[in-house]
Structures are given as C-alpha cells and as structure tokens.
Amino acid sequence: MTDPAALAEIEKRIQIVEDNLRQLQEQAAAYSGAADEERNAERIADQEAKLEALLKQREALIGKVQRDQKI
C-alpha cells in the first residue's frame, strides 16, 4: 500500500511548482528585453521539467495503489 504522506507531499510540491509557473509567466508578460526574456524562459523551462517529474511520480504512486488494490 502506498504511503498517503508521500502522495500528499507530491501534491503539495505540484501546487508549489504550478504557482511558480504562474508567477513566472506573469513576470514574462510584464518584462521586456532579451536578457529578461531568456532568463524567464530558462526558469519556466526548469519549473516545467520539475512539474513533469512530479506528475510522473504522482502517477507512479497512484498506479501502484491501484495495482495493490487489485491484488
């Protein structure tokens, strides 16, 4: 059986990264200039990668719960 605390921690981290992405996208819309745009693009890409990894972790954890329940 999967640890509910582990799932809760992943959900919390997903929310934080999603909030970071929203803030970065707002900043990107507000700033102009090549250096700012490049820096924001890198930060957004970093946060998107973190979000993707967390979503995969959550899916693996949920999938494990579903497989365990079938047994």
Image: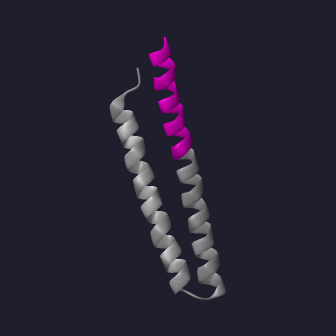
Color theme of the render: one colour
Q: Is residue 9 magenta?
A: no
Q: Is residue 25 left or right of residue 42?
A: left
Q: Nearer the viewer, residue 68 or 44?
A: 68
Dominant secondary structure of the residues highlighted in magenta in the image: helix
In the picture as drawn, the residue positioned furthest to the front comes out as 70
Q: Nearer the viewer, residue 15 or 71?
A: 71
In the picture as drawn, the residue positioned furthest to the bottom comes out as 33
Q: Is residue 55 magenta?
A: yes
Residue 36 falls in image quadrant? bottom right
Q: Is residue 63 above or below residue 39?
A: above
Which residue occupies 59% across, 54% down? 49
Q: For the magenta stretch, what is the residue range?
A: 54-71
Which residue occupies 54% across, 59% down? 47
Q: Nearer the viewer, residue 70 or 22?
A: 70
Q: Is residue 45 above or below residue 68?
A: below
Residue 37 falls in image quadrant? bottom right
Give the number of callouts: 0
- Residue 64 is situated, as x and y percent measured from the top left of the image, at 50, 25
- Residue 21 is situated, as x and y percent measured from the top left of the image, at 50, 65
- Residue 16 is situated, as x and y percent measured from the top left of the image, at 41, 57
Which residue occupies 57% across, 66% down? 44
In the picture as drawn, the residue positioned furthest to the top comes out as 71
Which residue occupies 45% across, 18% down? 69
Which of the image's four quarters has the N terminus? Answer: top left
Q: Is residue 17 above or below residue 3?
A: below
